[in-house]
Image: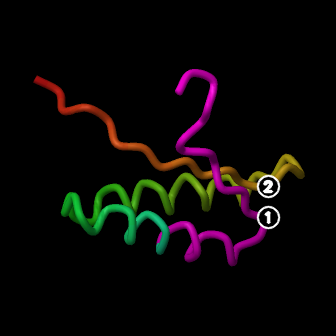
Amino acid sequence: MPGVDHNPPIYHPDDTRSVPVCRRMIHLADAAEQLGDTPELLGAELVSSAVRHPGGRGVALRLSAAPPVS
C-alpha cells in the first residue's frame, strides 16, 4: 500500500540502557536470517555512538531486510 510505512522506526531515549535493548532487538530480528554477530555488533556500535554524542532527540532504530546483492 503506497504511503504506508510497514517498518517504522522504534525510538529510544538518549540513555546507555538503549544499547542492550537495541542489540537484543537486532538479535531477535536477525534470528531467522542467521547472519551471525555482524548486524548485532554494528547496530550496537551505532546506537552507542548516538547515545555518547546526544543531540537530545533520542535514538531511532529501523530494521529492514535488504535485497540480496548479485
State the CA–CA distance, disc 1 to disc 2.
4 Å
Residue 41 percent coordinates (x, y): 39, 62
Q: Secondary structure at mark 1?
A: loop
User: Mark 1: which amino acid?
Assistant: Pro
Query: Does the magenta portion include 10?
Result: yes
Compared with 59, 19 (above or below) is below
Identify which residue is drawn at 56% across, 76% down: 20
Q: Does 64 sit left or right of 55 as displayed?
A: left
Pointer 1 and pointer 2: residues touching (CB < 8 Å)? yes
Q: Quadrant of the C terminus?
A: top left
Residue at the extreme left of the image, as rendered? 70
Q: Which mark is residue 58?
A: 2
The residue segment tinted magenta is: 1-23
The one nearer the camera, 62 or 38, is 62
Q: Label 1 belongs to which residue?
A: 13
The x, y position of residue 15, in whole percent, is 77, 70
> Does the magenta portion include 22?
yes
Q: Position of residue 52 (x, y in %)?
A: 72, 59
Q: Amino acid at mark 2?
A: Gly
Residue drawn at 17 percent across, 27 percent down: 69
Q: Is residue 16 left or right of residue 4?
A: right
